[in-house]
Amino acid sequence: MKKYIVLFIFSFQLYSQEKSKIVFSNETIVINSGNALEVETFVNESRAISKSKNTQEYAIRIPFDSFSEISNIKGSTYIAKTNKKIDLSSYSIVTIDAENENIYKSDNKYKYFVMPKVEDNSLIEFSYKTKLKQPRFLSSFRFQNPIKTQTAKLQIRCNSSTEIGYKLFGNYQEKIAFSKTKEGNFDIYTWEANDIPEFEGEENMPSSLYFMPHIIFYIKSYEIEGKKEELLGTPEKLYQWYYSITKNINKTDQTALKNKTLDLIKDKKSDLEKAKAIYQWVQQNVHYVAFEDGMGGFIPREASDIFQKLYGDCKDMANLLNEMFRYAQLNSNLTWIGTRHKPYTYADVPTPQVDNHMITNVVIDGKSYFMDATDKFCPFPFPSSFIQGKEALIGKTEKEFKIEKIPEVESGRNKTTILMKLNLENSSIVGDASVTVSGFKKSYLLTHLSAYNQKESEIWKDIITENNQKILLDIQELQKNDYQEFPSKANFKLILENGIKDVNGKLLLKPVLLFPLKESLIDIEKRKLSIENDFAYVYEIQYEYQLPLDYKVEFMPENAKAENDLGSFDIQYKLLKNNLIVTQKIASKKLVLENKDFILWNSFIKTLTKQYSQSIILSK
């Protein structure tokens, strides 16, 4: 589906000592509903530029697409020390395509210009007008930016007969003042915020939409010549529009597609086996290529065309899956969804802004499955990782739809299992290691292997060495098992030099060699934003040490375990004659660690890390 741009006109480039600011950012939207519905937006912004070398702060990008027109671009630079004003009119304004390496064809463009003659401590101001051709695509307004915002104001002016919907999101909402006034036949909605600090992104944070204060606004209804027209405002109205733009697809001959489907399922005994065969065929044979061109960003292309060409975007692949499932007599429907990038629900944002993706829902034996073939290695019947926990709008008939929350995949289904059979040789630990990965762990491994073939051996090794860089590995066998139910697997020869210390004739051995989560302690003093994980996961590691016959275990640590809502660990030690068996199970359970979780998480990690440092003493 077409992905809406929530625009930050300049990039997130932060400057610790050179602080510019937005003096004011004003946006006025005028909605007229005389003979036809017209929506125009007037933008006016001023910035105080502290250091002229920060070009991104005065290089302006104004987005538009085939549903909008940009006009009346004006601007000027005021240089304080010379009391000089330079007008933008004699400088170049160019139109450029919005670049995104993941999108093959897009109608997203920018009006681009650099404010003229900017020096240190300059003041810039620019303005422009936008005309919106599709009123359902009213967007959003942000009150926060990568540099400090002194004043940000949104105003919507509309006929009193026009009904507006809106919803605030993000932080600093207490700083946003709202008022509604009347001016003749117009209602005037105003939101104004003052003194909003710069937004500072942090590593592994969720989408900035969860934090940056912004408002989504839309038209619920309006009147044309005294007749009320419903537009948006409820999930029902949103679905009605979705249905209207998809009801006429798949009118071409699909005989070849049907025959292929029947061939794929001819030996399958259950509906689940049929669905799996179809899903994996689409995964393996249809290449994801994004299109965001006009209504082509919303309407799936003919399933027969996608079947013939073997490429398409998310809605094309969803449509193809849906048609094939239906030829297999499965209960399947097209499904709209917003990925985890979007913090919205259908109740809060019943507009196209809520969605940026399309998948297929299939119900088998009373259980609902969400199929997303754009993730080439996503295991059947998992949802893709980036839609876990999100609401999905399942279209059924012209009037019937269902909103269903996609479940999160539990940690135990995304597993890395490592078995090491080890010996002590002089000061080194040597032996064999076998690794298996399943679930999303397998999906991510195969995706990386597919993208970086030249680094394949290093990617496999990194499963172990990411937790201990001192371990040296020699690959013996690899099994990807791409679309099979078996995990991906690798076998290694292993050596860890200086893994044993001789202290006055006694051997000191730290038996735990791998340290999942050890580096995940959170700096609570510095960390401000929550932390997002792609998925919950489990490590299960077993070390089997064959101890020297002339040594006995003088000291062995006690077993240890801990568990809370965020994670768990269980480390066990067992001695069987001269064989020492250490088992280590580590689980990370939560997709998003919120600020309120940080103290508990750090306590858990400190307890775990302490166990990683335990030693075994061997003596003669």
Image (spheres, rainbow, N blue to C red):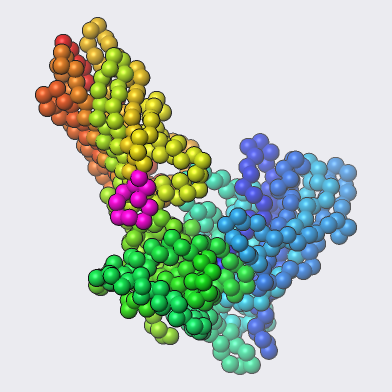
Residue that lies at the very extreme toward the left in this rendered image: 577
Answer with left or right where residue 164 lies relative to residue 337. right
Q: Which residues are magenta?
A: 479-488
Q: Nearer the viewer, residue 139 or 439?
A: 439
In the picture shown, does residue 560 fall above or below 358? above
Tell me which corner region of the image, top left, top right, bottom left or bottom right, holds residue 298: bottom right
Question: In percent of the image, x 61 and y 93: which residue is there?
Answer: 226
Answer with left or right where residue 126 lies relative to residue 400. right
Residue that lies at the very extreme toward the bottom in this rendered image: 226
Residue 395 place in picture, x, y as percent = 41, 77
Question: In percent of the image, x 45 and y 36: which residue is there?
Answer: 458
Q: Is residue 481 visible?
A: yes
Q: Nearer the viewer, residue 125 or 151?
A: 125
Question: In percent of the image, x 77 and y 55: which residue is there?
Answer: 113
Answer with left or right where residue 392 lies relative to residue 125. left
Residue 470 place in picture, x, y as percent = 39, 25
Q: Nearer the viewer, residue 66 or 482?
A: 482
Q: In which quadrant of the rendered image does the C terminus lie?
A: top left
What secondary structure predominates along the stretch shown in magenta? loop
Residue 406 place in picture, x, y as percent = 36, 64
Question: In percent of the image, x 62 and y 77: which residue is there?
Answer: 134
Magenta-span inclusion, residue 303: no
Q: Is residue 594 visible?
A: no
Residue that lies at the very extreme toward the top in this rendered image: 504
Magenta-span inclusion, residue 483: yes
Residue 456 place in picture, x, y as percent = 46, 41
